[in-house]
Image (cartoon, rainbow, N blue to C red):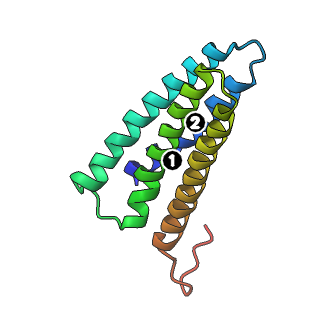
Amino acid sequence: MKAFISPTVVHFTTVLVIAVVALVPTHEWHTLASLLALVGVAGAIYSASVWIELFVHRRFNVDIVDRLFYAGFPLVGHLLLLLAALFLWRQSEAGLDLLAAGQITLLLAGIRNAWDMMIWIVIRIPTADPGSRDDT
């Protein structure tokens, strides 16, 4: 369980940090692009390490859909952020579309993974025997 909470928190945190950074009205094109590149590189490195754990080392026994949503899609999201930074550095408005695409990719991966963990927890919670009520 711990192995899957961290990636989900990282995805949500990345979306939140970028949303806050992008809202600063005094950013120049190059400042915003640099900050996005920094977040994108850090996230891509993290996602690549999760990818290696799930796909190469097969450290955890999870199906392909979980592997894609915990490592694959977030890696794509962070690479989109890097591409957005490149376009914004060149002062192209297409960078904003790429930024939105990266944010949406990370947000959808985080939502799906949070839902997946919640279902996993609910299914595995031991149920109390209905005949034995303990109201103490």
Identify which amino acid the numbered label 1 is placed on: Thr
- Residue 66 x/y as whole percent: 42, 62
Mark pair 2, 1: CA separation:
9 Å
Q: Which mark is residue 8?
A: 1
Is 20 placed above or below 55 here?
Answer: above
First in sequence: mark 2 vs mark 1: 1
Q: Position of residue 12 (x, y in %)?
A: 58, 42
Q: Is residue 17 above or below residue 64?
A: above
Query: Residue 126, labelled with which disc?
Result: none
Q: Amino acid at mark 2?
A: Thr
Above or below 127: residue 27:
above
Disc 2 vs disc 1: Cβ atoms closer than 8 Å?
Answer: no
Residue at image location 57% in from the left, 73% down from the top? 134
Could you say whether the residue bearing mark 2 is in a helix, strand or loop? Answer: helix
Left or right, residue 24 beside residue 60? right
The quadrant of the rendering that contains the C terminus is bottom right
Task: Pick the residue in front: 30 or 18.
Answer: 30
**Furthest-bottom residue in view?**
131
Q: Residues within 10 Å of mark 2 (few under 14, many from 20)?
A: some
- Whether 78 is drawn above or below 28: the answer is below
- The structure residue drawn at horizontal position 48% and vertical position 51%, both measured from the top left corner, is 73
Q: Look at mark 2 in the image and give the residue it sits on.
A: 13
For this view, does 103 lie left or right of residue 75?
Answer: right
**How many discs appear?**
2
Residue at left offset 52%, top offset 77%: 128
